[in-house]
Image: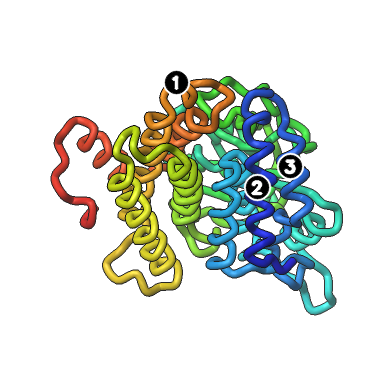
């Protein structure tokens, strides 16, 4: 689905109207989900040979930013769906007889049957909620495995047709696999209240002796399976794109405030210039022309900008911004997400030092 600049503006506007009610409703965000489906967002990443649009990364980043400007909930849920697809694509194949393997069949069904998926891999990366082997993998016979444990943070789990998840073997190696939501032993728990983004329905999914067939395996067993090329790599820059989208929303609302009240002209201009520079640097890294810029540097700058832009917007709106019906407070709460969700340890450490008044000027060297 080719989207023009006007299409993206309309998508942003529709999501912006739906985001506030979804945040307050504390249930599945039906309207947000329907808007994403209307724009065929769940097909954007699926390669053309499997029926999708096969968007390149630059196009996806532009669209993620537009979605996040309207609704961080929508952007979060879509990027978790895409994170699962990104790890399926390297394993998807069609043999000489034209028969698709398991990953390819699921990719086709995302388009033809309008299925959605999500990813549950924080137990393999940085989550500390359930310990180092939150999900244990055991080798069975004939290329099969058994998963026992938990996916601590899974977004949109209750509507997912299948999950991309993984476990850790006794020797420390890891596997990545497809797990249908209706497979025996899969249990989706009720979401716990979060500080923000409750409409994302992020929850814990338990695997009680869930068996993995040979065709379900996407990658591994190898050490650090998520970082392997076999697993499709990581998507850290996408999270920074979401931060830019939300910062853009806050800056746009800040522009509507009376500039004389808090002498906003100079601070606003500073935020606008910083946003434009960061966007340029982000897309430079995406295109491979980022110079000394790294995803970690971009993430630290994006985290800082979205936090400062949303708080500035809240302050400028004063008491009105503190109402639960006002977007300013919602954006300020949601900005906390970027500091805790898959935030690299060097970035988190540098931010804590900044907050402690110990900034050491290492923003470009972490």
Q: Position of residue 30 (x, y in %)?
A: 76, 35
Which residue is denoted by mark 1 in the rendering?
319
Residue at the spot 58% in from the left edge and 66% down from the top edge: 59
Q: Nearer the viewer, mark 3 or mark 2?
A: 2
At which x and y percent is residue 32?
71, 40
Residue located at (33% from left, 41% from top): 264
Give the Cα separation between the discs numbered 2 and 1.
25 Å
As drawn, 64 above or below 200: below
State the residue position of label 2: 13
Of callouts 1 and 3, the N-terminal one: 3
CA gap between label 3 and label 2 equals 15 Å
Which quadrant holds the N terminus? Answer: bottom right
Report the side of 196 relative to 37 (left or right): left
The residue shown at (38%, 54%) is: 275
Could one spot residue 125 in this view of the protein?
no
- Name the residue located 47 percent from the left edge and 42 percent from the top edge: 256
Look at discs 2 and 1 and give the one toward the viewer: 1
Q: Is residue 288 visible?
A: yes
The tag earlier along the polypeptide, 3 or 2, is 2
Circle nearer the N terminus (2, 1): 2
> Badge 2, how many Cα within 10 Å: few under 14, some, many 20+?
some
Query: Callout 3: few (<14), some (14-19), or many (20+) C-alpha neighbours within 10 Å?
Result: some
Residue depth check, mark 1 versus mark 3: number of the one nearer the observer: 1
Relative to 177, 283 lies left or right: left
Helix, strand or loop at disc 3?
helix
Check residue 28 in the rendering and tell me which mark sits there, or answer none.
none
Labelled pair 3, 2 in contact (Cβ < 8 Å)? no
Residue projecting furthest to the front: 260
The percent coordinates of residue 215 (x first, y second) are 72, 56
Label 1 close to label 3 by CB (< 8 Å): no
**Residue 21 vs residue 58, the one in the foreground:** 21
Q: Residue at label 3?
A: 33
């Amino acid at each position: 689905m080719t989207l023009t600049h006007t299409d993206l503006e309309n998508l942003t506007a529709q999501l912006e109207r739906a985001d506030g009610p979804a945040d307050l409703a504390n249930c599945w965000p039906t309207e947000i989900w329907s808007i994403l489906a209307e724009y065929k967002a769940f097909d954007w990443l699926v390669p053309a040979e499997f029926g999708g649009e096969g968007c390149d990364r630059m196009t996806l980043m532009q669209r993620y930013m537009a979605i996040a400007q309207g609704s961080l909930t929508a952007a979060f849920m879509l990027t978790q769906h895409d994170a699962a697809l990104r790890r399926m694509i390297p394993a998807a194949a069609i043999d000489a007889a034209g028969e698709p393997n398991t990953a390819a069949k699921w990719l086709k069904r995302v388009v033809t049957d309008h299925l959605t998926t999500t990813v549950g891999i924080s137990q393999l990366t940085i989550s500390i909620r359930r310990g180092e082997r939150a999900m244990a993998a055991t080798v069975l016979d004939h290329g099969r495995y058994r998963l026992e444990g938990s996916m601590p943070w899974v977004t949109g789990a209750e509507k997912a047709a299948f999950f991309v998840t993984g476990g850790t073997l006794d020797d420390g190696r890891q596997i990545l696999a497809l797990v249908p939501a209706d497979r025996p032993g899969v249990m989706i728990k009720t979401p716990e209240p979060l500080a923000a983004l409750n409409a994302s329905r992020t929850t814990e999914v338990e695997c009680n002796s869930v068996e993995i067939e040979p065709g379900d395996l996407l990658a591994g067993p190898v050490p650090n399976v998520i970082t392997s090329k076999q697993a499709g790599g990581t998507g850290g820059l996408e999270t920074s794109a979401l931060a830019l989208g939300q910062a853009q929303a806050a800056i746009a609302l800040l522009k509507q405030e009376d500039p004389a009240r808090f002498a906003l002209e100079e601070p606003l201009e500073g935020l606008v210039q910083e946003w434009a520079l960061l966007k340029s640097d982000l897309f430079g890294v995406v295109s491979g022309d980022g110079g000394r810029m790294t995803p970690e540097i971009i993430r630290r700058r994006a985290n800082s900008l979205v936090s400062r832009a949303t708080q500035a917007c809240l302050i400028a709106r004063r008491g009105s911004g503190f109402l639960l019906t006002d977007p300013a407070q919602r954006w300020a709460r949601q900005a906390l997400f970027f500091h805790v969700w898959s935030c690299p340890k060097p970035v988190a450490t540098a931010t804590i030092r900044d907050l402690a008044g110990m900034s050491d000027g290492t923003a470009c060297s972490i």
